[in-house]
Amino acid sequence: MNVFEIIGAVIGLAYIVSEYRADHWFWPLSLLMAAFYAVIDFTSGIYANGAICCYNFVMSIYGLLVWRGVIQKRKVDHGGERRISSCPRRYWWQIITAVVALSALLTWQLGYLDHSQYPLLDGISSALTIVGMLMLAHKWWQQWFCWMLVEPLMIALFILTGNYASAVLYAVFEVFCILGVLKWRKESIS
């Protein structure tokens, strides 16, 4: 455990609290967390998740624009922010297909990397993260289910790679996933 990982974990705590609250600090903290965890993941040999942090960085910019109503002005509240809503049923088959296909593709690709230590865990968690970030950008309350599946995989990866502060952080994230589903579903407009 190093100072960089501890700083990343502290940023992560602020990140998950702001995601749970759906407040305006979430996306800037998401940008910062993505930058820290890209370094942590790449140096730990968790390559797909490191690349996903780069994706999360870009998606954080997109999510900020969607939440602020700059892109897709639908469902914006009186404060100018997108409201929490439910994922339309027509997207569920696409979401499930994307998770399965991305998991298979990423696991297969990571299997060819000599330095990828845990391709199956890395591939599945990365696929769920890709889909979860897209759902989060749209402020769908069901995005928490992706994270509920991701967090145990990430805990295992971080323990296996000796990143214990990150493993503890992701255990805290799992608790917030449960709380997030309850809170966001209650606040959902549809």
Image: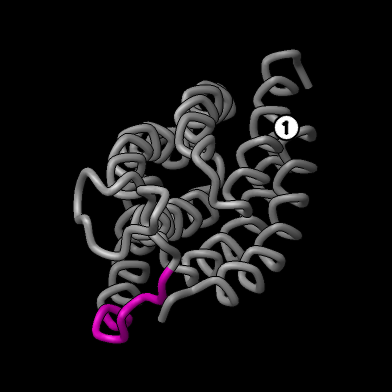
In this orientation, which residue lies closer to the viewer: 15 or 118?
Answer: 15
Q: Which residue is mark 1?
A: 163
In the drawing, does residue 125 fall left or right of residue 62?
Answer: right
If the image is split into quadrants, where does the N terminus sit? top right
**Which residue appears at 55% of the width and 23% of the height?**
36
Q: Quick check: is 142 in the magenta stretch?
A: no
Please identify the residue farthest to the bottom as the structure is shown. Answer: 89
Give the colour scheme of this rendering: one colour
**Residue 107 in sight here:** no
Q: Quadrant of residue 50?
A: top left
Left or right? Give the position of 37 relative to 1.
Answer: left
The answer to whether 141 is drawn above or below residue 44 in the figure is below
Q: Residue at x 41, y 62 (%)?
A: 83
Question: For the view shown, which residue lies furthest in the top direction?
Answer: 3
Question: Considering depth in this image, is 23 or 178 the residue closer to the camera?
Answer: 23
Above or below, 131 relative to 142: above
- Of residues 166 and 186, the one drawn nearer to the viewer in this rendering: 186
Residue in front for this viewpoint, 139 or 96:
139
Query: Viewed as shown, does residue 58 lie left or right of 116?
Result: left
Which residues lie in the magenta part?
85-93
**Label 1 amino acid?**
Asn
Q: Residue at x 58, y 25 (%)?
A: 40
- What count of labels does the image hold? 1
Q: Secondary structure at mark 1?
A: loop
